[in-house]
Image (cartoon, helix red, strand yellow):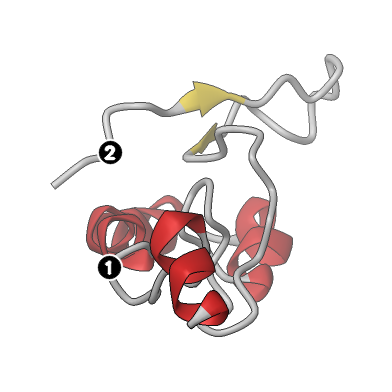
Amino acid sequence: MSLGRWVQIDRMDNPRFPDIETPCVKVCVVDPETQFCIGCGRTRTEIAGWLAMSPAERHTIVEALTERVATLTQRKSRRGGRSGRLARSS
């Protein structure tokens, strides 16, 4: 399963780095509990090593990202909003 939202990295015309697909959506915030980026679903280690990975390694990670991103918010218990305020005032 593919994310279908890959973009090309512009390596500033550096011939050492051909255009490499990335799932980055420029929302770079790592969830402290899961250690997954809430934008793309990758870990910090995966993000840092992305350019050094083979296409097969990147593909394996991308296959897991859809599920990771989908379950990021499901794992969270909501503490705010109206129900949070009502619970605190009781």
Q: Amino acid at mark 1?
A: Gln
Q: Position of residue 37 (x, y in %)?
A: 57, 60
> Residue 65 vs residue 82: left or right?
left
Q: Residue furthest front?
A: 90
Q: Position of residue 84 (x, y in %)?
A: 48, 69
Q: Quadrant of residue 75 in the image? A: bottom left
Camera-nearest residue between 63 and 85 = 85
Label of residue 62 in the image: none
> Residue 77 vs residue 21: left or right?
left
Which SS class for mark 2? loop
Q: Residue furthest top?
A: 13
The residue that mark 1 highlights is 74
Query: What's the residue at 55%, 33% (across, down)?
Result: 25
Which SS class for mark 1? loop
Camera-nearest residue between 57 and 82 = 82
Return the disc, 1 or 2, that comes first in the chain's sequence.
2
